[in-house]
Amino acid sequence: MVWRLLDAGETVIVIDRLSTGFDWAVPPEANLVIGDIGDQDLVAKVLREHAVEAVFHFAGSIVVPESVNDPLGYYLNNTVKSRALIEACVTAGVPHFIFSSTAAVYGTPVDNDPVAEDAALRPESPYGTSKLMTEMMLHDAAAAHPLNYACLRYFNVAGADPAGRTGQSTRDATHLIKVATQTALSKRPFMQVFGTDYPTPDGTCIRDYIHVTDLVEAHYLALQHLRSTGRNLVANCGYGHGHSVLEVVDVVRRMSGEDFEVRLTERRAGDAVTIVANSDRIKQELDWQPRYDDLEKIVTHALNWEAALTRRNTGPDSAK
Ligand code: UFG
């Protein structure tokens, strides 16, 4: 997102406490302020000094099983700190707020059809609830104050910048495509497929994998939408069709040329069978036209980034 905004000639300030991220991931042209979004004095200072016009709120904890074990930690990091950030924006008079929400707000859809934004909101984890509560706060705050917002409900984000500038770098990642590409590059001895007895054609779960660059573009269009119309927006970010776990594994094997070991194991707790976005709204409201709706491209870009990370971590600067 930072690269996209800089490419468009915008001025960008990043606030990050670097609990899971890395300072090297922030482009040198952006200002990095190391700190916590829950620190209202810090946030107020940054908003004032840079006359900030829009906030993209990406900060948050994202591992569903972790949220089940540490719900209060998730409500603190995702909900309480979001409240602080929204309040700081209201106080500073920031007009636009774009929030990273999640498909987890829906829980398990009642049927396996693509889920639309007006479906029932029934999160099944503290993670999903913590994000939904932030959506609710934004709704109410925008009704009371001169603030407008976009909540973008992400489905399964994957891939990496096609130009190779950035990609998912989190340590101990649990996401399927990250795990599979790491296994293909021998960073893990094997990977597991969690459950092969689901009611799907090949017995494994189905997800709507969205390329990060298309997701970023949705944010950029949402910003333009808020600037030009001032209308709030809640929209799914997905392609509207899914792939099974075994399909993903097959594509990673083909694209990498590595026949890595895959162990078929028990179901993982809390996995929904199928979650696919109905993406009509974002296409209509933002004229969003995905460019990377292609699992082979998603996997290729993820593999390229994983290889770049290997070079970074073993290169001359790796000790820094
Ligand atoms: N999976 C495996 N092996 C792995 C990792 C994952 O088989 O090593 C399977 C999972 O069981 C699941 C599928 O791959 O069936 C996708 O799992 P991910 O962990 O990649 O992603 P999730 O669908 O569990 O979660 C993602 C986001 C969440 C978000 C959720 C909403 O990471 O933040 O989608 O659907 F809440």
Image (cartoon, grey):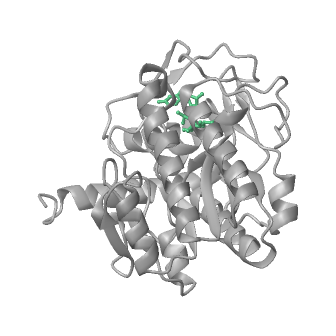
Residue 174 image position (x, y, % from top left) = 44, 34
Query: Which residue is pictured at 61% across the width and 55% down the height?
Result: 99
Relative to 137, 187 lies left or right: left
Position of the C terminus, as image quadrant, is bottom left
Residue 287 appears at what percent x and percent y?
82, 69
Residue drawn at 22 percent across, 56 percent down:
313
How many numbered discs, if any? Answer: 0
- Of the pair 293 and 223, the residue shown nearer to us: 223
Task: Name above or below for residue 210 compared with residue 166.
Answer: above
Q: Nearer the viewer, residue 189 or 278?
A: 278
Residue 259 in view (yes/no): no
Q: Is residue 315 left or right of residue 51?
A: left
For image coordinates 56% across by 15% down, the residue present is 267
**Image coordinates for residue 279, horizontal then vertical, percent:** 81, 51
Q: Is residue 1 left or right of residue 115?
A: left
Q: Residue furthest bottom?
A: 9
Q: Is residue 307 above or below residue 262?
A: below
Q: Ligand 1 is found in which quarter of the picture? A: top right
